[in-house]
Image: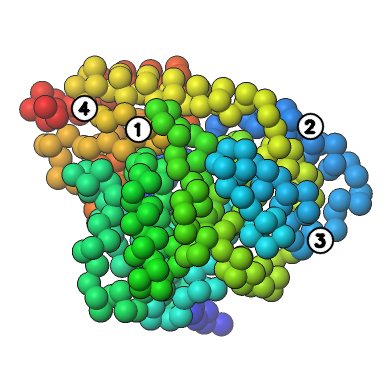
């Protein structure tokens, strides 16, 4: 039998990530110890108030049926969490929808609001799931360059009118992945005016909301008028080290939330009840877990950034998220080649910026997902490798 793939599969080719993974495996097979800073998956365990709830309810045979939607308790917990942390009031019945991880929302929501041929405005560099969601909806991506000189905020005034006329959605992501930038209140206000003027839905990806160091990120929904034009996605994956649990939520405009719920009722059967119970417990928790978690990531950030600067690689310190977005040495013209050299010569894996879009060229992303001793070792291996020659150092 000849297997024929759907045309949409042309959008899902093997990426730079696959190539780097193969190179990493080759180094390991050759007996080399590799330090992997390429994947943004928390290495820290979830707090015991999460794992104990999962363990407790997993032994209850009544927990193994279809959940279909978010439980009343979970939806209420989201509302409580946002009221307490962001002074945002949510109607849990009409303005909150449970997701099976934020990637579920990012990939599926464009199919709810975008027709084939529509444009989706996305940050460039941006998280790769944005392109996947557009491809599933048959929509076109229009990249919004995130430039250092603009504090990595997109310039909405540069978008051509013919694109705006066909645009149905704008995706924003602050703190961002791969760029750990923060939005200002003024930028969000501008985005709301822009969305109202052009009848464009805003989807704000807020997955890194609780991983911040120097200042607290702003929830899009805390800005006046935000519920009229959009929704915010948030996740427990990074904040509570629950990445494998696949539990998140969309909040905001009730008509949009209703449409998302309608769509999801046709494609999945909900999150496992013990996971929902644990997530509810996490959102209602008033311990110091989140602040202590931030201290761990802040210490890792300082070790890596300060250490790299000490050996001559001038790296900016992120204000939030679990990533360092670092300019490559000027002697390199390609972020991919620099990443390859780091693997082969320093045995350190990072992600080249070009993997996240055209405007990511010239940077690499490093995830703070290794313990302190491994980050110290990373610095030693990069210095010893000779990659950072004097002629290549950023001044």
Residue tagged 1:
318
Q: Residues within 10 Å of mark 4 (few under 14, many from 20)?
A: some
Q: Is residue 24 above or below residue 131?
A: above
> Could you tell me residue 69's position as x and y percent?
74, 61
Residue tagged 3:
66
Instruction: Tell me: 2 left or right of 156.
Output: right
Picture quarter with the N terminus: bottom right
Residue tagged 4:
314
Instruction: Name which quarter of the figure residue 266 lies in.
Output: bottom right
Q: Earlier in the sequence, mark 1 or mark 2?
A: 2
Picture quarter with the C terminus: top left
Q: Residues within 10 Å of mark 3 (few under 14, many from 20)?
A: few
Q: Is residue 188 visible?
A: yes
Q: Is residue 151 above or below residue 260?
A: above
**Residue at 70% in and 70% down:** 265
Tell me if label 2 and label 3 are in contact, CB under 8 Å: no
């Amino acid at each position: 039998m000849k297997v024929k793939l759907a045309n949409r599969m042309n959008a899902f080719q093997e990426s730079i990530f696959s190539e780097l993974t193969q190179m990493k495996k080759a180094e390991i097979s050759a007996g080399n110890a590799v330090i992997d800073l390429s994947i943004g998956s928390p290495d820290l365990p979830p707090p015991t108030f999460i794992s104990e709830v999962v363990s407790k309810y997993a032994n209850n045979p009544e927990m193994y049926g279809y959940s279909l939607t978010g439980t009343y308790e979970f939806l209420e917990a989201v509302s409580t969490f946002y009221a307490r942390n962001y002074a945002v009031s949510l109607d849990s019945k009409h303005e909150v929808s449970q997701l099976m991880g934020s990637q579920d929302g990012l990939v599926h929501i464009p199919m709810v609001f975008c027709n084939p041929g529509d444009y989706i405005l996305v940050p460039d560099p941006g998280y790769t799931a944005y392109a996947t969601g557009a491809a599933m909806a048959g929509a076109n991506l229009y990249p919004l360059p995130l430039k250092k000189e603009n504090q990595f905020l997109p310039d909405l005034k540069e978008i051509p009118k013919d694109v705006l006329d066909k645009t149905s959605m704008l995706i924003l992501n602050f703190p961002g992945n791969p760029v750990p930038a923060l939005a200002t209140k003024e930028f969000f206000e501008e985005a709301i005016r822009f969305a109202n003027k052009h009848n464009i839905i805003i989807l704000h990806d807020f997955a890194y909301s609780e991983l911040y160091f120097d200042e607290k990120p702003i929830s899009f929904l805390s800005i006046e008028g935000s519920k009229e034009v959009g929704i915010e996605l948030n996740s427990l994956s990074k904040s509570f080290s629950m990445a494998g649990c696949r539990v998140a939520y969309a909040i905001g405009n009730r008509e949009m939330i209703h449409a998302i719920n309608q769509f999801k009722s046709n494609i999945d059967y909900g999150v496992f009840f013990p996971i929902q119970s644990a997530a509810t417990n996490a959102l209602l928790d008033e311990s110091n877990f989140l602040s202590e978690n931030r201290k761990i990531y802040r210490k890792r950030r300082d070790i890596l950034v300060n250490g790299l600067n000490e050996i001559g690689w001038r790296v900016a310190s992120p204000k939030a998220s679990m990533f360092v977005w670092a300019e490559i040495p000027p002697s390199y013209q390609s972020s991919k080649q620099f990443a390859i050299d780091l693997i082969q010569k320093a045995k350190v894996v990072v992600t080249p910026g070009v993997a996240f879009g055209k405007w990511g060229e010239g940077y690499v992303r490093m995830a703070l997902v290794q313990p302190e001793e491994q980050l110290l070792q990373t610095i030693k291996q990069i210095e010893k490798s000779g990659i950072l020659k004097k002629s290549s150092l950023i001044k």
